[in-house]
Image (cartoon, rainbow, N blue to C red):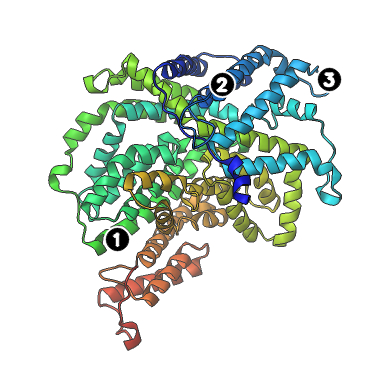
Amino acid sequence: MIKAALAIFDEGCRVKPAGKLYLVIALLGVPLTLFEIWFALLGSMQPLTLAVVFVGVLYTTTFLTVSSTQKNRHLTLLDHALAVLSFACSVYFIFQTPRYVEWVAGISEFTALDLTSGAAFFLLTLELTRRCVGFGLSVVVYALLAYLFFGHQLSGVLAHREFTPAFFIEQMIISINGGIFSGPIQVVAAYVFLFILFGNFLAETGGGRFFFNLAALFAGRRVGGVSKVAVVSSGLFGMISGSPAADVMVTGSVNIPIMKKMGYSAVFAGAVEAVASTGGSLVPPVMGAVVFMMAEFTGIKYVDIAKSVVIVCLLYYASIYFQVHHRSARLGILGLPKEQIPSIGRVCRDGWLYAIPFALLIWLLLAGYTPGYAGALAVLSMIAVSWLRRETQITPRRFVAVCVNACCALGPLIAAVAAAGVVMGVLNLTGVTGKVSSVMLAITGGNPFFALIIAMMITVLLGMGMPVIAVYAMVAVLIAPMLVEMGLPVFEVHLFLVYYSVLSAITPPVAIAAYVASSIAEASPMAIGWQAVRLASVIFIIPFIFVYEPALLLKGDWRQILLTAATAFIGVYFFALGVEGWYKGALAWWHRVLLLAAGLFSVYPGWLFNIAGIILGGGLILTRHGAGLPLPAWARRNGTMK
């Protein structure tokens, strides 16, 4: 009975467009792409208009590419009807945007046609969320809707005033403080789409292979070279794609088979790819476009955010790099064969054309141009330089294919972000955010550290199976105000939430990056997910550190920044040794426990802890070189790593 009840939240099945369906999506996707580029470079219309056009097209294409249930692998008449209804409602909204921009709640007239089309579009949003995102987010949305419509019957702190359906629909369609077309969707429409498009053009022209060759040049010769190449190449591509799943699909199709061939288990190969791809959303300057959403919520300049996360990003990838190094040493896996490592000349010859749009993108962003302007010019430059080589040319046919693929891939993102807008609207109407803050203050006793732990758990749970941007948009409204109210800095709080929104992609049971990696590695997604968490174990601690030690975010005196960064990297190394259990041989269990403690002490804010951690960890490492004191008999047994 419970299973049957939960079945109503089952996701739909992806339908690959072909024939007439492909033509229909192309007729929608190509004009949308051109319109987005025009808007970014020359457009002066209201952001609401862009959002309505963007959402209308993508709702239509998503209903045509995602069936109603997993069992239905073909589109039905209902799917086509919902697509037509989505298009019709959005056309109506486009013509009404001049009214909506000047809207004054309670004064402007909300007509019957506004109500009808708004209600239809809201129901379409709920259905699209179910099809594309599934159980987790759908339950959150329906629970909040139940509270909104029936919460006035409650008593005490949970009670709120009564809302009519007409007023609710008005807020969901027109309000800028929460609703389908509010800030999150506008950011995705104005900025994120162009960066996803850039990533698709990059993949279409062979960018995945270029990143592999570039990483192989610098890391391929070292112990475990192939796994280190996977870490570097996945991080670089993930910076642009902004989607862990998309990154795993592009770079993992190259990296995972090679890792398996070199001797890594399928589970470990999939986990390395999953955790490295997930971290791409933390790599500046693009940060998978979530940085633009953070700038929207905090009012902090994009450039300031991108510069501040450099050390944190390096710590993320250093922790993975250290672990794969020692796992490779344990397995006896050396670097890539010499013939598989490209020369500098070959990398430059094959990849120089990718450097042009990348350099242009980074320069424009750092120079202060809008992300949309930078993304649009990067897309155009990518198309232009592709014609300098026959095999990379973006021909009209390939251009159409990229537009179609982008529209199909954006379905889950647009559904999740629209639903996040609904959640934001309900939270604002009912005042849930303030009530959550009161409850959290009571539970934690006003202790910020305990509040951060709860915030981490909520973010990871909400983020299971959801795009990073949508997760962050929800927790930025639900949790961030409470943490700031406790006295924590705004920037550190929002970056903390971004960090765990990203890590939710590798956290079981719904680890979306692990599920995609499992299809390539041919291994259990749960096993890959837990192995990914093990690889990222120290990474789950880092956000707590930078909240209390802002030097990790390049704040403060440069000497303090350098010393803090140095102790953090040392601590990450000790922790990686403890997790892997290998340094010039297998480590005993007590050796591993002490190394984990040394790692925690080294990254913990406070010089006494740092000095103690470095002495402890350094002493333990020296014992592996025979330079320490003789070990007691009980400690001479070597442990083995399971």
Report how far apart the C-alphas of labels 1 and 3 lie in the structure.
66 Å
Does residue 55 appear anywhere in the picture? no
Residue 217 spot, x, y in % from top left:
22, 42
Report how far apart the C-alphas of labels 2 and 3 lie in the structure.
33 Å
Pointer 2 residue: 83
The quadrant of the picture occupied by the C terminus is bottom left
Upstream in sequence: badge 1 or badge 3: 3
Q: Quadrant of residue 549?
A: bottom right
Residue 193 spot, x, y in % from top left:
49, 27
Q: Is residue 488 above or below residue 622?
A: above
Name which residue type carries label 3.
Ile
Upstream in sequence: badge 2 or badge 3: 2
Do the residues under discs 1 and 3 have CB atoms within 8 angstroms? no
Residue 630 spot, x, y in % from top left:
29, 85
Picture residue at 46% right of the left edge, 43% below the top: 282
Name the disc covering residue 107, or none: 3
SS at circle 3: loop
> Is residue 209 found left or right of 442 in the rendered image?
left
Pointer 1 residue: 327
> Is residue 633 found left or right of 77 in the rendered image?
left
Tag in front: 2 or 3? 2
Name which residue type carries label 2.
Ala
Upstream in sequence: badge 1 or badge 2: 2
SS at circle 2: helix
Tag in front: 1 or 2? 2
Q: Is residue 83 above or below residue 350?
A: above
Q: Dot 1: few (<14), some (14–19), or many (≥20) neighbours within 10 Å?
A: many
